[in-house]
Amino acid sequence: MKTLLLLRHAKSSWKDDSLADHDRPLNKRGRKTAPVMGHLIRDEGLVPDLIVSSTARRARETAEKVAKACQYGREIELTEELYLATAGEILHQAQCRPDDSAARVLLIGHNPGVEDVVNVLSGRREPFPTAALAVFELDIESWCELELGIPAKLVHFWRPRELE
């Protein structure tokens, strides 16, 4: 059994229109919300064995704040492949894990890809706002078995506004 956590990056700033999309930081709300989601992960006993994040600044900052708040004790793995990735590309980031000892993996990415993964795995359409978190239980022994369409149980779905 594996657990896949999917988190959309927290709210980003659009103040500086000279910045490339990849370089946009979190805004005030995003800097507040990311630790809230990290505390939730810790309090629910869902601290991941591995965090993999997009290299985009807003995703990296989200990952750092979540990791600190949930007391994640390892390095955050950064990959450009999660930046604006499709659903299949997002799942590939969990699928290609060489270490199957990681029972819980947290992927931090962007829409529409993250929302598409949630919709396909859960079998229902759900809006997936910034800093939303979905948790799936997967009846697989190895991450290499992960693919779109496998049986997955959505066990938690949190939107930050519901937690305030």
Image (cartoon, rainbow, N blue to C red):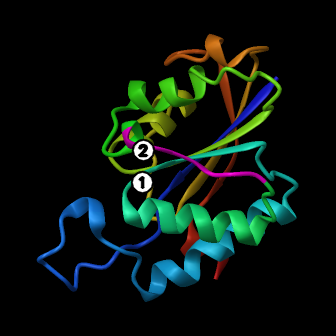
Looking at the picture, how far across and down is residue 121, in whole percent? 54, 29
Which of the image's four quarters has the C terminus? Answer: bottom right
Looking at the picture, how far across and down is residue 146, in whole percent? 60, 17
Other residues around mark 2 within 10 Å, as few (<14) / some (14–19) / many (≥20) = many
Of the two numbered discs 2 and 1 on the same chain, state the one appearing first in sequence.
2
The circle drawn on residue 115 is: 2
Mark 2–mark 1 Cα distance, whole angstroms, equals: 7 Å
User: Residue at 47% across / 78% down in the picture?
Assistant: 30
Camera-side residue: 79 or 33?
A: 79
- Taking the view exactly as shown, the residue that stands out farthest to the front is 75
Q: Are marks 2 and 1 in contact (CB under 8 Å)?
A: yes
Between disc 2 and disc 1, the foreground one is: 2
Looking at the picture, how far across and down is residue 96, in whole percent? 57, 20
Please tell me whether residue 36 belongs to the stretch shown in magenta: no
The residue where tag 1 is placed is: 127
Residue type at tag 2: Glu
Residue type at tag 1: Pro
Q: Is label 1 in a helix, a strand or a loop?
A: loop
User: Residue at 35% across / 49% down in the picture?
Assistant: 111
Which residues lie in the magenta part?
A: 74-80
| Residue 8 to residue 155: above or below | below
Tell me if 113 is positioned left or right of 2 in this view. Answer: left
Camera-side residue: 13 or 152?
A: 13
- Taking the view exactly as shown, the residue that stands out farthest to the top is 145
State which quadrant residue 37 falls in: bottom right
